[in-house]
Image: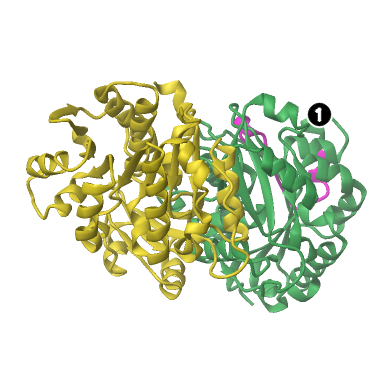
Chain colours: A green, B yellow
Amino acid sequence: MEPTLDVVGVGNAIVDVIATVDEAFIAEHDLNKGAMTLIDADRATSLYAAMPPGIEASGGSAANTAAGLASLGSKAAYLGKVRDDQLGEVFIHDLRAAGVGFDVAPGSEGPPTARCLIQVTPDAERTMNTFLGISAVLSPDDIDDSLVASAGITYCEGYLWDMEIAKEAIRGAMAIAADAGRTVSLTLSDSFCVDRHRDEWLDLLTDKVDLVFANEAEICSLFRTDDFDSAAKQIGSMVETAALTRSAAGSVVVSGGETIAVPAVSVTRVVDATGAGDLYASGFMHGLANGADLARCAELGGIAAGEIISHIGARPQVALTTLI
Amino acid sequence: MEPTLDVVGVGNAIVDVIATVDEAFIAEHDLNKGAMTLIDADRATSLYAAMPPGIEASGGSAANTAAGLASLGSKAAYLGKVRDDQLGEVFIHDLRAAGVGFDVAPGSEGPPTARCLIQVTPDAERTMNTFLGISAVLSPDDIDDSLVASAGITYCEGYLWDMEIAKEAIRGAMAIAADAGRTVSLTLSDSFCVDRHRDEWLDLLTDKVDLVFANEAEICSLFRTDDFDSAAKQIGSMVETAALTRSAAGSVVVSGGETIAVPAVSVTRVVDATGAGDLYASGFMHGLANGADLARCAELGGIAAGEIISHIGARPQVALTTLI
């Protein structure tokens, strides 16, 4: 049966709290610059208290990707968990208003909606500190099997792998997608996340994943190497297609023995790297859904990523259809 | 006794929900473009549902002014009411992190923290729809008398006048300030707000207010005239000092029979007018607190307003000390 949905994203449903800081702030608070670090409620409270004034904006890696897909004109849905609190309300609104289908029932008890305390430094790098809250308890019950089966691509966030129950939910979603003959996609999310789950992921990539997204640090971490070309070759032998981003150096697609390098689009001023990888995935999968060749998919990824890094926040500020 | 605080602001404690819309949205939802309209909880829900994805940022007129004062290096405090909910937490954090003293206890029952649904149109105009929530029940008990008495200027938001109990809180604060020999200031806030309270405000301005802030529409509404010069003359006979803003035409200060016109600073690109009046008041009162003459006060107001309209959101994105 033809898919009725282009992509369903599965991930941690998070509201971002974004503030601009100087390098001294990163050092003073012992933050892991450029990475995503999981923090508990107490650390979230103390770190937030130390942060300068900020803004709140919906985030969450796969949710950003889904919002980008909708902005490009693809049909996207999302699976993730919020609480019935004010930040949950914001998350639901922003995703639905972006045109993404989102019907997971908000939790009525337990921890609050997840938030990510993001520090943006003058070099436009983002440092993320995530309090997972209720997003971590996304359970197999939250996965709508028929929705997953109806999507051409099921796109899962590596970040979810940090919690046992969410991991189960992903494995379930991947199995449904595979049974329906759909494409199963995974983003490696973060090099530290790769480090925590290397062995499991190597198995998962070999057996269950068709399309993988990773940046240079993540793919190199996966294969414990500093040699990007070697990592690209290795991943190419494990999955059907790997889309590997290299920041300003563009991206490399490895598929069926072929390697395609595509330059990055030029961006007048890089303001905030948050969401670059997420939006690259939006563009790439929008291309796939529309039958574009892989070079064009990578180009579309670069265009979507270029928009997102030109401003604060990880959701598009213009209709991406106007850029392609 | 010398004041130990430069300014205490009294106002509706609000978190802004800001989205960019086209002109058609304003028409379709029957919004009062450029104005501040009070909405109830049901309308807030339905209007929010119709809005595109947005961002959340702390707002509230007098709170923006206090944040601007702190950013300029003045000592500022704030009196306003939030709930002990997530948006209340955001409001408290952003104000304290900006360096503003804020110690009003959050309410533990009753309506939620106030929010203002703001639509920014391509002409950079902002249309505000405020659900007052708990901010409307700021009561005389929430006013810290010794804090008010310690401030050189007590700056009150006209917006507060819409609720009986908050009006009582303002009248109380003004009386304490006057008894302590301090400057009492009022901003007229909004031309429709002026329309709702004209007679009371004419009395209040004559008897209780030393320093008034208003834009052209507000001051003309107060005297039911289209003639700005006539309105300026009339307000000049009622208060010690009136600082009147005229958008791109700069501002006019009327004080002791003297009228001083000061041009606006040039802004490369006006993005969002939200907070322009609030930040003008910050700059003006920073000047007063530092013994500047009125022309320089107006100039400082223009500089602070110029920063705020160059980006989305009503709180400064750079330390305003770097601009003066």
User: For the residue carrying disc 1, how many other residues have a C-alpha within 10 Å: few (<14), some (14-19), or many (20+)?
Assistant: few
Query: Which quarter of the rendered picture does the N terminus of chain A lie within?
Result: bottom right
Say which residue appears at 39% left-offset and 42% top-offset: B179
Looking at the picture, how far across and down is residue B251, in whole percent? 21, 33
Kind of residue sitting beneath label 1: Asp
Magenta span includes B274: no
Looking at the picture, how far across and down is residue B46, in whole percent? 43, 73
Looking at the picture, how far across and down is residue A300, in whole percent? 53, 46
Check the image and report above or below for B97 versus B161. Answer: above
The residue labelled by disc 1 is A227
- For residue A224, which quarter of the picture? top right
Look at the image and tell me whether residue B196 can be seen. yes
Say which residue appears at 78% left-offset and 45% top-offset: A43
A61 or B139, nearer to the observer: B139
Look at the image and tell me whether residue B271 can be seen. no
Looking at the picture, how far across and down is residue A287, in whole percent? 56, 54
Element at label 1: loop
B290 or A259, nearer to the observer: B290
Q: In screen coordinates, is A285 left or right of B228?
A: right
Number of labelled discs? 1
Q: Pinpoint the chain carrying mark 1.
A: A
Q: In screen coordinates, is B303 left or right of B314?
A: left
**In the orientation shown, which residue stands out farthest toward the right?**
A199
A200 or B128, nearer to the observer: B128
Q: In screen coordinates, is A232 left or right of B276?
A: right
Magenta span includes A247: yes
A229 or B233, nearer to the observer: B233
- For residue A147, which quarter of the picture? bottom right
Magenta-highlighted residues = A232-250
